Image (cartoon, rainbow, N blue to C red):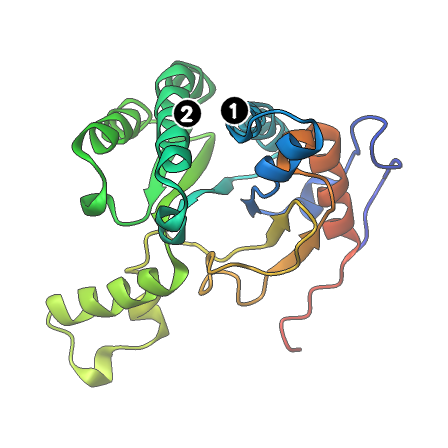
Amino acid sequence: MAALDVVVAGEGPEAVAEEFVPRHVAIIMDGNRRWARERGVHEAAGHAAGVDAIRPIVERAQQRGVKILSVFAFSRENWQRARGEVDTLLSLLDAAIADYTPDLVRQGVRVQLLGRQDELATSTRESIEEALRATAAGSAMTLNVAFNYSGRCEIVDAARRCLADGLSIDQIDEDALASRLYTPQPSELDLLIRTGGDQRVSNFLLWQAAYAEFYFTDRYWPDFDPAAFDAALAEYARRSRRFGR
């Protein structure tokens, strides 16, 4: 795999030939709190900046021809954080969903939720469900929002669905599990981006990332702009994906 017409990152769009654009991109949006601390502002300001950073990346992904964009908004492990921080995160995400949904409808972006909805508060669940209904007809791109999400729980839930559907042991194979994941089919991940400097997957899309390319950047999520996204796509286009062959 080789990129065509690639420009140095950070100074503008990087043109990548359509055949080299990943179909499914996922982002672990990390570094909001460190971004705030380094600027001497409250952590809530970092989370607010992180929420604001989502919109331009969704728009750029659609412009570049990405068909599925999955973002890690809130993990099941995040409930262990201080109550005040959790409340801030939930309120910011709730407000962002309400504010951004009309734009997503106009852009033809369909929203899907990845995670255990039944564990969420009624108000949060209703806000998410409204966004799902409003964007259901979107066909330009799918935006997967991982909210109250755990990759291990997703696999457990898929196995439980196999049993609930009456499958025998011999019928439970990779296809049976894959078709019962939170992500709609086909769900294979091509490129996983993580901001903030850490180099781990943190229980995100474990099944889907089996053959994904990983791209790590030291930039904190609030500073990850469309030019940085273009740089990630350009790096992906340089990779040789052999899938064990």
Mark 1 belongs to which amino acid? Ala
- Of labels 1 and 2, earlier in sequence is 1
Q: Nearer the viewer, residue 100 or 25?
A: 100
Residue 184 visible = no
Q: In the rendering, at what x and y percent does residue 179 appear?
A: 31, 61
Q: Nearer the viewer, residue 91 or 190?
A: 91
Instruction: List the residue tagged with mark 2.
Output: 92
Name the quadrant of the N terminus: bottom right
Mark 1 and mark 2: Cα distance apart in space: 7 Å
Residue 125 image point, x, y percent: 22, 33
Say what secondary structure mark 2 lies in. Answer: helix
In the drawing, what numbered circle is on residue 48?
A: 1
Residue 129, numbered label: none
Placement of the C terminus among the 4 image quadrants: bottom right
Looking at the image, residue 26 sits to the left or right of residue 177; the answer is right
Residue beneath the point at 73% across and 47% down: 217
> Residue 26 placed where, x, y %?
54, 47
Q: Residue furthest right?
A: 8
Residue 233 shows in this picture: yes
Dot 1 and dot 2 residues touching (CB under 8 Å): yes
- For label 1, the SS is helix
